[in-house]
Amino acid sequence: MVIIVFSSPGGRVPRWTVPRLPPWVNVRGQKSPTGHPEIFPLVLTTKTQEIFGCRAEEDVTEEHPNKLIKKEDILQDFRNRAGISDFHPVKKIVMEYPGEELLVVYDKEFKYGQNFYLIGTEEAKENILNPPQEQTVTEEVKESVEEVYVYKPSVPKPWVSLGSEEEIEEESVRESTVRAKYKISRKRREFGAPIEFGDHNASSVKDSYIECTSYIDKNFIVKQLEKDAAVQVIPILKDEHTQTQWKHPRNAAIQYMPREFSEEEKETLLKSDDLNDFLNSVSLSVEVALQQNEIMNVFIDDWKVLAEEEATFGDKTDSYLKEYQSFTDLHNIKEKTITCICWHPTIYGLIAVSIAERLSYEERVHYSGRLLLQPSLILFWSFSDPIHPQLMLQCPEDIFCFRFCPSNPDIIAGGCINGQVVLWDISAHAERIATVKGSGGAGKKAILKPIFLLEPENAKETLYVRHCAVSSIEHGHKKIITDLHWLADNFELNRMGYVFENRSGISCQLVTCSIDCTICFWDIRPTRPPPTPTDKKKEETVEVPHDIPSTFLHLDLSWRPHIRITLAKHGTTLDHCPVKISLRDDFLRYQVQDAQTLQQKALIAGDDPFHNLEYGLAKILKPMEDHNTMFFVGTLDGEVIYTDWRMQRDHDTGRLISSKPSNRYLVHDGSIHTVQRSPFYQDIVLTIGGWNVAIWKEGVPQGPLLQSSCSTRRYTAGHWSLTRPGVFFVGKEDGYIDVWDLLEKTHEPAQTQNICITSIMYIKPWIFSTKQQFVAIADYYGTLHILEIPWTLSHPSSNEVQSVNNYFDREVNHLRYTEKRKEIRDKEKEQMQLESERKKVKVFQKSREQMEAELRLKYEEYLELEKEILGNLGISHETDRIPSSFRDLL
């Protein structure tokens, strides 16, 4: 029930209706706008008054303003009218009201700002409906009786809080920061350890003493934030001075003509013995000095020469990566991440990165409309401009892997998230990015930079390059392409995967892998001669835009793979999901490409080498029987697979099927993101995935040569060093990078360094010169960090290649020895099991005579023991006590 109370005729509330509480806080801790915590003004419309029977001047008047309303009726009004109910502002008060009826009072004079107000407590409702009689009578008596002053002693009353303690609490000062706590501990075994003092040679110290100089401790320096200074107004003073030159007379002489001996003096000197003796004494020294000047420069400063090397390439003792430069695009990389990095093979200081949205599959489906309006790009950065990219390659979808063609760096292939393979031809911009110009005078070291980076600011407009060909959606991959590699220019594959000689000398084929469980080989050459166009076809031909090269026009939207490989799982109908692959000739791609070699190949091929190629695989080629067709594959489940790309014919159907994997290893506990050949050993492979790292050797099926323990953070990227065979870099999800040095440690990283605050997505080192190397590291937020590799991590020792190779050989011998010992132990276990079975058989094959003999022997032992015990007890041994059954045996 709800009680409604209306104001008195005078528009005042009796004193007993207001409880003694703070005027700004009600019973439930909520503020009331009237100043009384139990009164809540309401605006009741005519409709609400009719519903609850409290119509103004009809159901309630100024003389009878009170109205009781059931709580259930108000709750039903909430359910019917929800937010438009007039009681909605006090919904919380109504929901928490303990009684069944609430009191609503008609406020005709709008004392509290509205036409009604609600009483929020049971105590105030009872005081209004049933006012105390004694207090009323007392007030009437006081009005009738004349006021007579009577002294009343003060009576202490209990203290009632009016909120002053809250004001004091608000004004009090507290510490806003949490105090730092430090705990200093040491090992238990060091408690009470004896202190050892050492001797120091005073002669090795300057002035034979060591001074402990004082220093300023910043922790105890008090900064003066405020200072009182008094200024007195005084006349302006001005100091002026002059300086005069004191010209005093002095004697000065200048010799402007040489002073020569006379002819007589010359003859006298030449004939003198002193001159002859002097020339004879110094002639030998002068001859030696002249010879030394011809052999070496005696005026060179050896210390400066030594310091120049250290100043240029860093201290040899420094082993940490140094931040050299960073790249970020505030317009195109917003809310995007870097998926792949490739250094330009011939232009130094030019690097390309692909960017993609930082969205999951569900988020991509949800925001598919917005993603269509945002371009997918590959950005070209240069060291001279860290903000503005030099070129932008437009993509149909986000690119997750791309590579420069090893034969022609102007040709770029990339793999999209939708499974399509894209080709770009940037040869139209070759003159702009291929010319290299040095900067600096004779005393400075020349730095190679692209010439377009030296143009004026108004000429630095970023160019957008559209793709010239894209593969067919129906015949390509069905899911994201995770890895892409160009095949070498010395061989090519037919439709069955067999290797043939490549006569053109140009890389024309590439391989891709996707999580749709397929590995595809592609050929960029036309499969048949182009047909002769007729007049009708000329009319129907669509004109290609001028900004798109026609190099691969024959492949656009019709390009399909000529080899498709699936990796079947053993014993199931499912297939492996390849994520990364590594071919045998991949180690050649890590070396710096020679610009002159590429130019010679381009001259041999012609102006347009990809148009002058023979028509694909429709020619007689020379097979290469000795070429290795095996390769490593890393899967989404963390498995490392060693398989063959050659196809086989099914004996039943005659169709081409993929070869079964030769070896399969489950070493990693997560998806593999790095499968990479060593730049120094073509049979050594590095795999990184999940929380560990492994190194494999081709031809060793026993397992990995090295398998690290689980890291505290998940590994996300990795790469071999290009100059040191025993060093590789591993990036983690917390922004740290682990540097492994196999010559120093093989069980853990040699050093760990923080690069960024987010996950590392890609690592790509590059050799800038023989004395300077860089490594490009991309993070999750789209920033590209360029770090300089220190001397210790870039320059190998004289025999490091052989030392690391010996380490791998020892690990191979260890694996083979372990396998042999395992076989020996298995044989020993089998022999032990057979021996135990033979013993069991012998036990069960005992004859009756043997069993009786054993029983007789045991009984005789029992009788001897019994006789001995009875003799000790003084009891005679009686043979009649022996049972008849045993007596028969005796």
Image: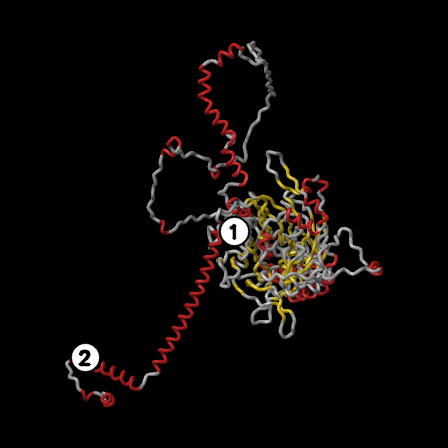
Number of labels in the image equals 2
Which badge, 2 or 1, comes first in the chain's sequence? 1
Question: Quarter-wise, where is residue 49 in the image?
Answer: bottom right
In the image, 771: left or right of 538?
Answer: left
The residue that mark 1 highlights is: 725
Task: Quadrant for the N terminus, please.
Answer: bottom right
Amino acid type indicated by mark 1 = Pro
Residue 536 picture location, percent across and down: 84, 61
Q: Type of residue at label 2?
A: Ile
The residue that appears at 63% across and 75% down in the rendered structure is 652
Query: Where is residue 351 drawn, in percent x and y?
Result: 63, 48
Residue 692 visible in the picture: no
For residue 613, above or below residue 794: below
Q: Is disc 2 placed on a helix, strand or loop? A: helix
Q: CA distance from mark 2 to mark 1?
A: 83 Å
Q: Which residue is mark 2?
A: 869
Image point (71%, 43%), residue name: 460
How many other residues sit within 10 Å of disc 1, few (<14), some (14-19) or many (≥20)? many
**Residue 157 drawn above or below residue 289:** below
Which of these two is toward me, 736 or 703?
A: 703
Q: Quadrant of the C terminus?
A: bottom left
Task: State the image coordinates of residue 361 (x, y, percent, origin top left).
Answer: 64, 61
Which label lies toward us, 2 or 1?
1
Q: Residue at x 50, y 27 (%)?
A: 290
Where does the image place residue 544, in percent across and percent down from the top left? 78, 54
